[in-house]
Image (cartoon, grey):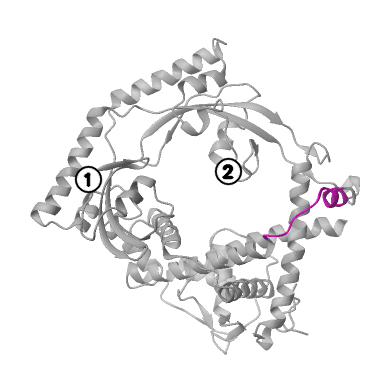
């Protein structure tokens, strides 16, 4: 049974490593790195000294391999020596220790990734462009916020244009999604019975049974500054002016989006969103307008949870449309913000004085639609229940509730919504569960999850072994002596 526990730990590490390697491919796709020539001499690219030092520190301790050699081929995919070098560079540059991480381990994970992608295509797993584009937009937005501007991002990743970088990011993001869906398909029919859960748990010696971290159930009350009718009217009038300038004066809608839109995901591209579908993730009001217009038509101003928009249909492509939009937010005065702060201070004082319960106050006064009908109770998005592991929950939320006693009310915190508008909240811990050793009755759902994960792991291992045998795999002789978890060299 010790072996079972070790296997589970190993799988968790491997899953983290798999995710990281895929992310490495996102940010290094097509990027040049230091290479070692046949003499073992590092060839220096024109990279700044700090990055060069990271590469040297990463590569020098390891066995020398010829530059840009083909390390392996899996199906239609080629893995180069430089792909492994990039993995080391990115591991170290992000603060992840490379001690004990061998080239053989990284090679095994890279081949595993390519196997998933190869068979995802073989099984006709389809992913639309509309699913990937928002992920690329989000990634670019993050990189711009970290580095400073689109021009700096393009330069940092050795690309000529943002379009070129976007194309590379798109392909790798799509490969990541293909691999994820292939793995999900492998385990989609794996189920666990109560008897299997029981057998799994009681096969673990009592002294080796896992400990579960402390957990909390959390409720919150949110008060948002009220958007006045005047503020709404002002933003609608502004959108109407932009619309009129496009329709009456021939101004460019794309230019208006670049100059005025508050949507960071599309403003730099002239407000463009491609491949919108009726079943896509966009807001209902957004899709209704997108599919009610002809090419070149511009909508009247309309409201979604994200703000106020005008939208132009750029191109109709069968069941998909490309659109451009301008997003604006109503202005909120300091007077309105101060009134919201006073309101939540009053609510908190009433709860602390036992004039009203937290649950009733949430139902009466909270502006958060998702939680107020449940007395402010938060739902864990990872597990869809009300318990949060203090060691795994969002760091910002954890910091706000970590030291709260059960029933204690927090101070007032200021958050910002997706529009950048301030909102205020108070929180309470409705129930606290201290760290404890696994108990079959008390922790049945967690134990069931561990048992199911182990069964899924066996299913994945069986799938890998079966697919490796039927897939063209060629491993370079430099890596044939590695001890892989799977039969990559088909011995």
Q: Which residues are magenta?
A: 188-201
Q: Is residue 191 magenta?
A: yes
Q: Quadrant of the N terminus?
A: bottom right
Q: Position of residue 7 (x, y in %)?
A: 79, 60
Q: Secondary structure at mark 1?
A: loop
Disc ID at residue 300: 1
Residue found at the very far left of the displayed protein: 249
Residue 98, visible in the rendered structure: no
Q: CA distance from mark 2 to mark 1?
A: 35 Å
Q: Nearer the viewer, residue 338 or 84?
A: 338
What residue lies at 58% left-to-right and 62% top-to-bottom?
A: 20
Q: Quadrant of the C terminus?
A: bottom right
Disc ID at residue 381: 2
Q: Is residue 355 above or below residue 52?
A: above
Disc ID at residue 281: none
Which of the 4 image quarters holds residue 108? bottom right
User: Position of 432 compared to 316: left or right?
Assistant: right
């Amino acid at each position: 049974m010790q072996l079972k526990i070790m296997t589970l730990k190993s799988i968790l590490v491997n899953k983290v490593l798999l995710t990281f390697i895929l992310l490495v491919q996102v940010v290094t796709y097509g990027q040049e790195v230091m290479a070692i020539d046949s003499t073992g001499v590092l060839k220096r690219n024109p990279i700044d000294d700090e990055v060069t030092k990271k590469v040297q520190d990463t590569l020098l301790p390891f066995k020398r391999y010829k530059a840009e050699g083909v390390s392996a081929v899996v199906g239609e995919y080629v893995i180069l020596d430089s792909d492994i070098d990039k993995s080391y560079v990115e591991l170290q540059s992000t603060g992840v220790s490379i001690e004990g991480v061998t080239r053989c381990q990284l090679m095994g994970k890279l081949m595993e990734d390519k196997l998933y992608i190869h068979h995802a295509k073989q099984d006709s797993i389809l992913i639309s462009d509309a699913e990937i584009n928002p992920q690329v937009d989000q990634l670019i937005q993050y990189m711009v916020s970290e580095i400073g501007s689109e021009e700096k991002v393009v330069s940092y990743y050795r690309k000529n244009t943002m379009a070129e970088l976007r194309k590379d990011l798109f392909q790798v993001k799509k490969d990541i999604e293909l691999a994820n869906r292939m793995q999900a398909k492998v385990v989609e029919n794996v189920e666990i019975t109560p008897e299997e859960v029981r057998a799994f748990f009681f096969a673990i010696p009592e002294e080796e049974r896992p400990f579960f971290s402390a957990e909390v159930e959390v409720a919150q009350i949110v008060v948002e500054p009220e958007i006045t009718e005047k503020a709404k009217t002002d933003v609608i009038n502004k959108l109407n002016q932009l619309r009129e300038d496009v329709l009456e004066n021939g101004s460019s809608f794309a230019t208006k989006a670049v100059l005025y839109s508050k949507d960071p995901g599309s403003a730099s591209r002239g407000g463009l969103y491609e491949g919108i579908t009726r079943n896509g993730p966009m807001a209902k009001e957004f899709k209704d307008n997108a599919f009610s217009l002809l090419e070149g038509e511009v909508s009247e101003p309309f409201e979604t949870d994200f703000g106020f928009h005008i939208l132009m249909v750029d191109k109709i492509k069968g069941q998909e449309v490309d659109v451009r939009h301008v997003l604006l937010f109503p202005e909120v005065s300091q007077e309105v913000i101060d009134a919201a702060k006073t309101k939540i201070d009053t609510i908190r004082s009433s709860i602390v004085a036992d004039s009203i319960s937290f649950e009733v106050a949430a139902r009466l006064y909270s502006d958060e639609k998702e939680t107020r009908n449940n007395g402010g109770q938060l739902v864990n998005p990872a597990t869809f229940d009300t318990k949060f592991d203090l060691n795994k929950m969002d760091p910002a939320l954890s910091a706000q509730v970590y030291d709260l006693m059960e029933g204690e009310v927090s101070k007032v915190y200021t958050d910002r919504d997706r529009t950048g508008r301030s909102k205020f909240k108070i929180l309470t811990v409705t129930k606290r569960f201290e760290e404890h050793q696994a108990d079959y009755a008390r922790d049945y759902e967690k134990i069931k999850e561990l048992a199911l994960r182990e069964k899924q792991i066996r299913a994945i291992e069986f799938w890998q072994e079966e697919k490796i045998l039927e897939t063209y795999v060629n491993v370079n002789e430099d890596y044939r002596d590695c001890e892989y978890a799977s039969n990559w060299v088909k011995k």
